[in-house]
Image: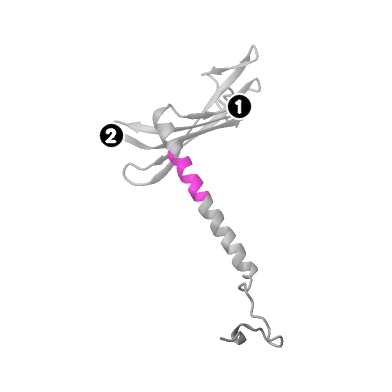
Amino acid sequence: MSNDHWSVDENQPIPPTSPTSPSPVRLWLERIGIGMVAAISLLVPLIIGLLFYLALTDGLVINADDPLHEIRLWMVQERRGATGLGLTITSPSASQDAALQCARTDVTFLKWDRRLSIESDADYCHCFERKDGRLVDTATATCR
């Protein structure tokens, strides 16, 4: 048996052992795809956990100590079960009296009981008077 088939001819180029490198566009598309899969795989358990938490508690309140800046998220519960999510966002508003501080609250509902819908037709206003460093609700004042 001869070793001729194992010999390398020095005049012939050596074939590449690795495939050609992918284009930069393909690399970025792969990175974006991997990022989207990672984001979805992290968001799904987060959303399920948040819905579970909202079903067991009265809701999630952000900045609860300040009545002028407050965000509240809760699950709308009816006799037949959960029918949607509610979101209130409270922000400062102008008042007719300079001594009062008012806050306007916008209420938005995401409902899924009959069909998926977003309803944001409710808003209301509260005015507060500062007493002893705290804000006290006043029912007599109105917002602008």
- Could you tell me residue 123's position as x and y percent? 48, 33
- Could you tell me residue 128's position as x and y percent? 58, 20
* Amino acid type at mark 2: Arg
Q: In whole angstroms, how far apart are the C-alphas of marks 1 and 2?
A: 41 Å
**Is 81 in front, or is 30?**
30
**Is 119 in front, or is 113?**
113
Would you say residue 40 sits in the magenta stretch?
A: yes
Q: Main secondary structure of the magenta part?
A: helix
Outermost residue toward the right in this view: 10
* Amino acid type at mark 1: Ser
**Is 18 in front, or is 30?**
18
Outermost residue toward the top in this view: 132
Q: Quadrant of the N terminus?
A: bottom right
Q: Quadrant of the C terminus?
A: top right
- Could you tell me residue 132's position as x and y percent? 64, 11
Tell me the element at label 1.
Answer: loop
> Dot 2 surroundings within 10 Å: few (below 14), some, or many (20 or more)?
few
User: Residue at 55% of width from left, 56% of height from top?
Assistant: 34
In the visual, does 143 lie left or right of 12? left
> Dot 1 surroundings within 10 Å: few (below 14), some, or many (20 or more)?
some
Q: Is residue 118 above or below residue 59?
A: below
Residue at mark 2: 80
- Could you tell me residue 14's position as x and y percent? 67, 81
* Quadrant assignment, res 79: top left
Magenta span:
39-48
User: Residue at 64% of width from left, 77% of height from top?
Assistant: 16
Tell me the element at label 2.
Answer: loop
Residue at mark 1: 95
Q: Is residue 110 above or below residue 28?
A: above
Outermost residue toward the front in this view: 1
Q: Earlier in the sequence, mark 1 or mark 2?
A: 2
In the visual, does 25 lie left or right of 81? right
